[in-house]
Amino acid sequence: MKLNSLTDLFQHEIKDLYSAEKQLVKALPKMAKAATNPDLAAGFEEHLAETQEHVNRLEQISKDLGFSLGRHKCKAMEGLIEEGADLIEEDAQENVRDAGLIGAAQRVEHYEIAGYGTARTLAMQLDLKAAADLLGLTLEEEKATDIKLSKLAANTVNVEAAEAGGDNSQE
C-alpha cells in the first residue's frame, strides 16, 4: 500500500489495529487458560469480549468509510503474542507465570494504546468524527484494562509470586 496521504496512513493504521485485534482474539483464551489466578483468568476472558467489540468497531469504521481491511498483518502484535506464548511454555512457578502474563498483557495494551491514540488523532485531523469517537472509546477501554492489570499485579499477583518464590536471593 502506498501512503500518499493522511487518509492512506489512517487506513493503514486501521488495518494494523484490525490485524492486531484479530490476533488477540485467538491469543486471549490461551492466556486465560494459562493463568492460575482466578481474577487474572477472568480479566483475560472479560478483555476477550471487549476485544471482539474492538474488531466490530474497526469493521464499522472501514465499512462507513468504504475501504477494505484486506490481509494486512500486524507484525508487532505477532511478536508480542509470540513472547507471551513463549512465557506460557516456560517451566515456571504458577504465581510467577501469572506475574509474567500480566507483563506480557501490558506490553500488548501499551502497543494498542499507542495505535488507537495515533488512529484517533488522524481521524480527528481528517474530520472523521464518527471514527474518532469509536477509536476514542476503544482507547479508553485499553487504558482501563492496563490500569486493572497494574492493580492486580501490585495488590495480588506480584505479592503472591514474591511470597511463593522466596525472591530475596540473587543469582
Image: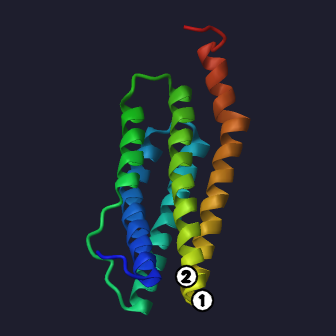
Name the disc covering residue 123, or none.
Answer: 2
Residue 61: image location, x then y, percent: 46, 84
Drawn side of residue 54 relative to residue 74, left or right: right
Image location (x, y in percent) of residue 21: 42, 63
Q: Which residue is at a point 52% across and 64% down the rendered structure image?
A: 115
Label 1 SS: helix
Amino acid type, residue under disc 2 in the picture: Ala
Q: Nearer the viewer, residue 131 or 35?
A: 131
x and y percent of residue 109 in the render? 55, 54
User: Measuring 41% from the left and 80% from the top, which residue is drawn there?
Assistant: 59
Name the residue at the front extreme. 4
Identify the residue under disc 1. Answer: 129
What crowding class fits label 1: few (fewer than 14 Cα within 10 Å), some (14-19), or many (20 or more)? few
Give above or below for 97 relative to 124. above
- Quadrant of the frame with the C terminus: top right
| Residue occupying the point 42% across, 33% down | 87
Q: Earlier in the sequence, mark 2 or mark 1?
A: 2
Category of crowding for the residue at label 2, using alpha-carbon neighbours closer than 10 angstroms: few (below 14), some (14–19), many (at least 20): many
**3D distance between C-alphas at marks 2 and 1:** 7 Å
Hey, what amino acid is under mark 1?
A: Lys
Residue 56, x across and y down, in percent: 44, 77
Q: Is residue 67 left or right of residue 38?
A: left
Q: Are marks 2 and 1 in contact (CB under 8 Å)?
A: yes
The residue sitting at 66% across, 11% down in the picture is 168
Of the 4 image quadrants, the one containing the N terminus is bottom left
100 or 163, which is in the foreground? 100
Between residue 54 and residue 37, name the one nearer to us.
54
Q: Nearer the viewer, residue 25 or 70?
A: 70
